[in-house]
Amino acid sequence: MPNDLLLFHGFTWLLFIMLVFYMVTVLRKPPKKKPRYIESFEVEAPPEVILEAIAYFGMKKNMDIDFFDENERRITLGDRLNLFSGAFFYPIYLTTEENGATLVEVGVKGKASITGSAAFRYRDKVVQGIKAAIFMKSHSRGLV
């Protein structure tokens, strides 16, 4: 009987910790400044097309659009906490370069205090998905 009670208390504490972690990830607001580690790439397409492609990518991947401002050319995607993801924000910044190309900068910021290689792996997957979405959107409009 004491082992069952100990197991019950351990399970209760685990459930409580998971609930607190979930609440932190749900209530945290997207970052306002650029994260320290950014992956960037250039695209030969207008920023409006790129923003549209990124928003489309986020919706298809069932991500939240936590921030969107077409005037600032900034969008922040966010994934939800689940067994396969650590709940991250992906702030994305667009800048028009002198050569007419658009610089796309993608960062990653944990909704909870999660950093390190896992965060960068998730960011890299998002970057690859965004590149594919931009490629599809640019080619469907005949921009490339």
Image (cartoon, grey):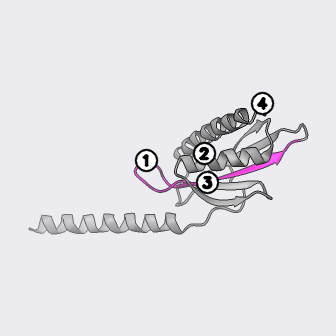
What residue type is disc 2 on?
Phe
Q: Which span is picked out in magenta?
A: 78-97
What residue type is disc 1 on?
Phe
Residue at x 64%, y 50% (from the top left corner): 55
Disc 3 + disc 4, Cβ < 8 Å: no
Examine the structure image and report whether residue 126 is included in the region drawn in magenta. Answer: no
* Quarter residue 11 falls in: bottom left
Q: Which element type, helix, strand or loop, lies under badge 4?
A: loop
Residue 132 in picture, x, y percent from top left: 63, 35
Residue at x 43%, y 47% (from the top left corner): 84
The residues tagged by marks 3 and 2 sit, at their Cα atoms, a distance apart of: 10 Å
Left or right: 20 as drawn, with respect to 73: left
Residue at x 53%, y 47% (from the top left corner): 61
What residue type is disc 4 on?
Val
* Quarter residue 98 falls in: top right
Residue 23 in picture, x, y percent from top left: 46, 68
Other residues around mark 3 within 10 Å, as few (<14) / some (14–19) / many (≥20): many
